[in-house]
Amino acid sequence: MSGPLAGLKVVEMAGIGPAPMCGMLLADLGAEIVRIDRPGESDVGIKRPPEANFLLRGRPTIRIDLKGPVGRDRVLALIEKTDCLIEGFRPGVMERLGLGPEPCLERNPRLVYGRVTGWGQSGPMAPWAGHDLNYIGLTGALEALGRADAPPPAPLNLIGDFGGGALFLALGLLAGVLDARRSGRGQVVDAAIVDGVAAMMTSLNGLRASGVFPTERQASILDSGAYFYDVYACADGRHLAVGAIEPRFFRTFLARLGLGWDDLPPQQDRSRWAEGRARLRAIFATEPRDHWVALFEGSDACVTPVLSLEESFENPHMRGRGTYVEAGGFLQAAPAPRFSRTLPPPPGKPDVNMPLPRWAAIPADPGA
């Protein structure tokens, strides 16, 4: 294997949302991961063909029946050889399987035992079910999104599952491995989505605490309150993202539109933001999106098209960077971030039949 995480050994318990996303991120950067799933078809997540479950790329799957001592012993045999474990079950599930932190760390004292859940391993809501929308709703992030005259939108599961969950778990695992290699001792990483999203809200929290940002929705620069930081519909029903915050970029924005400094309300006059928005809505509604894209191209006006995923595949900048690559017959996001020396391997296709790494060779489970 190549990549900056070459040689890192990970056991991943099959799950949904942040757990497989974390596994993908580590595998993309060269970690050797073995994913453990139950026998038969798993009744979790959104149904899709196995070859299109891109979060499972780059690592093999072993099917093990965990409901008995044979399966448990197989997993412990793997854990004995690994650096990290990823699990995303509700609190108590791994303990009931005999695979909680205590027996795992007893078998491998250097193990970094990573747990990712919505509510965390402790607190009154820890046992409850939930999904991304519930978790970000509890942190204040959801309340801050969207228009003032409508309920907050459901922003896919990017903020909670993947931002506050998978990324913070990956950070915690790697920090734990660095410490284990120095101290010789492993530990448990409790990555709660609510904790991660709360950390992501730190900047906004500071702005509100200082009185710079108002507490109501759609009343600040970054939440579409400002007319110069918003999304506008064009004549063809497609959209532009306008982010001309700094005065020098705002001047360029005006110049490309053929407007003068006084043709739109002053940027800092919140009382006239609605007036500026109405003016820009009328302007952008006169031409199709690609007309405006061509008008602003090559400038620092901070105006870009709002692309569909399929359009993003063909965008010149995304193609120029190689942001998407072909893998398994599909275009997928390339491993990120980029490294100048320890280049990650190309992303592998989701393939439960890919060969196991040599360290993962353990006796077969006759019940699988």
Image (cartoon, rainbow, N blue to C red):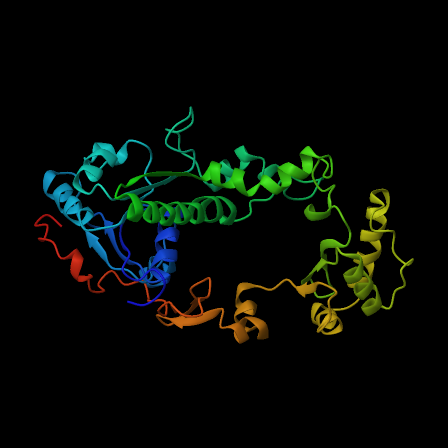
Q: In this view, does 96 lie to the left or right of 345?
A: left
Q: In which quarter of the image is residue 243?
A: bottom right
Residue 2 vs 82, above or below: the answer is below
Pick whichever, 131 or 223, lies toward us.
223
Rendering coords of residue 242 (x, y %): 72, 59
Q: Which image quadrant: the N terminus?
A: bottom left
Rendering coords of residue 241 (x, y %): 68, 59
Rendering coords of residue 16 (x, y %): 36, 47
Pick whichever, 267 or 225, lies toward us.
267
Residue 232 vs 190, above or below: the answer is below
Residue 309 vs 35, above or below: the answer is below
Residue at the spot x=38%, y=51% of the render? Answer: 22
Q: Is residue 74 left or right of residue 251?
A: left
Residue at the spot x=54%, y=35% of the render? Answer: 139
Q: In this view, does 261 lie to the left or right of 79?
A: right
Residue 13 visible in the current orientation: no
